[in-house]
Amino acid sequence: MARIQKIISGGLTGADLAALDFAILHGIPHGGWCSRGRKAEDGTIDAGYQLKETPSSGYPVIHISRNGGGASSPVQELLRFIQDHRIKVLNVAGPRASKEPGVYDLVKNVLGKVLGV
């Protein structure tokens, strides 16, 4: 089981929002950066998410693989990464919900297994 002190993300639909909702649900401090105007594909990112706005209105682009990185599962890959690098603040980013249906549930499921909640 991993011990994370904070989860950060950009607040976009899909992987980003799943990570923030997971943090809030489980009392894990959260934060991150979002585009100026709190812009997301489904409207404005709720002010309840503790995100700072960037000077730009562009979106950050990082993709998290559904299959993990090789023969291991996403849970095993994330747990190994957290442990190997002694991660205390986890930045979760990934595809928008419109680009990868099901990513929201996948991220919440993987985080739950990795963090033991």
Image (cartoon, grey):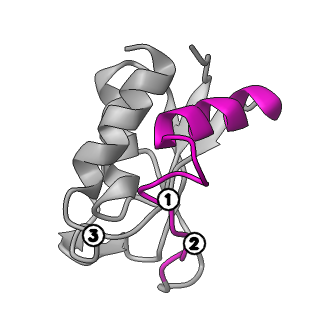
Residue at 29 percent across and 60 percent down: it is 14
Queried whether the magenta region covers residue 41, the answer comes back as: no
Q: Residues within 10 Å of mark 3 (few under 14, many from 20)?
A: few
Q: Amino acid at mark 2?
A: Thr
The label nearer to you, 3 versus 1, is 3
Can you tell which quarter of the image residue 24 is in? top left
What's drawn in magenta, residue-wise?
A: 59-85
The label nearer to you, 2 versus 1, is 1
**Which quarter of the figure is the C terminus placed in?**
top left
Report, in whole angstroms, how far the alpha carbon at label 2 lies from the one at label 3: 25 Å
Residue at 21 percent across and 75 percent down: it is 98
Report, in whole angstroms, how far the alpha carbon at label 3 lies from the one at label 1: 13 Å
- Image location (x, y in percent) of residue 2: 60, 18
Q: Which residue is mark 2?
A: 54
Q: Secondary structure at mark 1?
A: loop
Residue at 41 percent across and 23 percent down: it is 113
Q: Which residue is mark 1?
A: 93
Residue situated in front as seen by the camera: 27 or 76: 76
For marks 2 and 3 on the same chain, the one whose residue lies earlier in the sequence: 2
Q: Secondary structure at mark 3?
A: loop
Residue 49 in sight in this render: no
Q: Which residue is mark 3?
A: 100
- Image location (x, y in percent) of residue 116: 44, 14
Vertical placement of residue 28 versus 100, above or below: above
